Image (cartoon, rainbow, N blue to C red):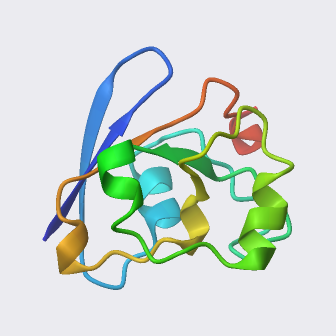
């Protein structure tokens, strides 16, 4: 199992366990985190934006140009922002730490 630690906007820590090949967006949604993923991983939105802890950011494979373009549209994006739909879990990401931006909303809940 690969452990992922999410920190919510209000400081709550939520841990989730996934398997190699699991998609980070689906893992977060399964834990009830407000990452909408409107485009279902097609990189046509930025509703699954997360902020990766700086010490983990360099361990991820680089973002594609398309992902970078979508991150330009994400509210609150910063240097370590990524789209969670583009992060596939692997054993070397065990312990990955991320923050859910304060602006994150999941309109499926309303």
Nearest the eye: 102 or 108: 102
Residue 21: x percent and y percent? 35, 85
Q: Measuring 78% from the left and 44% from the top, which residue is drawn there?
A: 74
Please indicate whether residue 87 sits to the left or right of residue 95 in the image.
Answer: right
Residue 51: x percent and y percent? 52, 43
Residue 94: x percent and y percent? 17, 64
The residue sitting at the left extreme is 1
Please indicate whether residue 49 sits to the left or right of residue 31 in the image.
Answer: right
Count of all numbered marks drawn on residues in the image: 0
Please indicate whether residue 40 sits to the left or right of residue 96 in the image.
Answer: right
The residue sitting at the top extreme is 10
Q: Quadrant of the N terminus?
A: bottom left
Q: Quadrant of the C terminus?
A: top right
Residue 83: x percent and y percent? 62, 60
Q: Measuring 68% from the left and 79% from the top, which residue is drawn there?
A: 64
Q: Name the quadrant containing residue 8.
A: top left
Q: Is residue 85 above or below residue 88?
A: above
Q: Measuring 38% from the left and 44% from the top, which residue is drawn there?
A: 54
Q: Is residue 39 above or below residue 15?
A: below
Q: Name the quadrant containing residue 88.
A: bottom left
Q: Name the quadrant containing residue 45.
A: bottom right
Q: Is residue 94 above or below residue 15?
A: below
Q: Measuring 45% from the left and 52% from the top, which residue is drawn there?
A: 28
């Amino acid at each position: 199992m690969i452990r992922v630690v999410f920190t919510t906007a209000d400081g709550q820590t939520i841990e989730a366990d996934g398997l190699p090949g699991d998609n980070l967006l689906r893992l977060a949604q399964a834990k009830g985190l407000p990452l909408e993923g409107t485009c279902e991983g097609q990189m046509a939105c930025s509703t699954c934006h997360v902020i990766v802890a700086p010490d983990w950011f360099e361990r991820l494979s680089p973002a594609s140009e398309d992902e970078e373009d979508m991150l330009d549209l994400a509210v609150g994006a910063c240097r370590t922002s990524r789209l969670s739909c583009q992060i596939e879990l692997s054993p070397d990401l065990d312990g990955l730490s991320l923050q859910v931006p304060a602006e994150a909303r999941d309109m499926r809940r309303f």
